[in-house]
Image: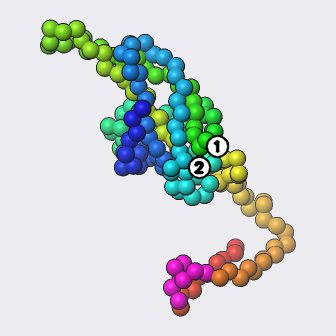
Amino acid sequence: MTVSDHRTASATGVRGLVVQVARTDGSTSSGRVDVAVPYGSWAEAFGGDFADRLTLVSLPACALTTPNVPACRVQTPVRTVHDRKDRRLIATVTLPGAVTEPHSRSAAAPQAQPRALVLAATSTATGASGTYAASSLKSSDILAESRLTYVMVRLNKNVAPVGERIRCGYG
């Protein structure tokens, strides 16, 4: 398993971790393997119960070389077991077999080159503690009799400098 750097993950559109998983036995056949991706060291990287909403997705191999191409950023969900106790994501995936270059210039037998499966640990809208998904709000949902509750909130000076006003609206 090879872990990509943060810049690469960001370029693919992933808010999380991108890894490449490949066979190491030189086999040209595909094979199933269990993959575990630990996330404990970056579980709170983005807030909002980020770790609770993590899952694995696969990306096309081109995501690492041409992430600006929309087709290379398509995320395909992978059936994931979320082991919250040990802070890891577990999945059974199929790794592609290695490829052999047909035209080798050396006298030696051609070496099989591994092909990698690209996986990303990224967040979804929903986790065990709730959802961040957008709710549907239609004009028919407006109450016939509206009531507005005022709440006093003490703000940290980092939110709004002294003398600045924060306005909240209701409509």
Residue on which disc 2 sits: 51
Tell me where residue 21 appears, x and y as whole percent: 43, 29
Please name the residue shown 37% across and 46% down the image. Answer: 5
Count of labels in the image: 2
157 is within the stretch colored magenta? yes
Q: Label 2's element? A: helix
Find disc 1 in the rendering and name its residue.
84
Decide whether residue 55 is among the magenta residues.
no
> Which three-letter amino acid code belongs to the residue tagged 1?
Arg
Q: Quadrant of residue 48?
A: bottom right
The mark lying in front, picked from 2 and 1, is: 1
Which residue occupies 53% across, 56% down?
Answer: 46
Dot label at residue 69: none
Dot 2 or dot 1: first in sequence order is 2
Whether tag 2 and tag 1 are in contact, CB under 8 A, the answer is yes
Residue 165, visible in the rendered structure: yes
- Percent across and percent down for residue 118 are 43, 33
Q: Tell me the magenta residue range.
A: 155-162
Local packing at callout 2 (Cα closer than 10 Å; few below 14, some 14-19, many 20+) is many
Q: Residue 132 at x, y = what percent? A: 65, 54
x and y percentages locating residue 15 in the rendered image: 48, 49
User: Please, is residue 37 above or below residue 142 in the view?
Assistant: above
Q: Secondary structure at mark 1?
A: loop
Q: Quadrant of the C terminus?
A: bottom right
Locate the N terminus by quadrant.
Answer: top left
What type of secondary structure mainly makes up the magenta span? loop
In the figure, is residue 137 to the left or right of 147? left
The answer to whether 134 appears left or right of 45 in the picture is right
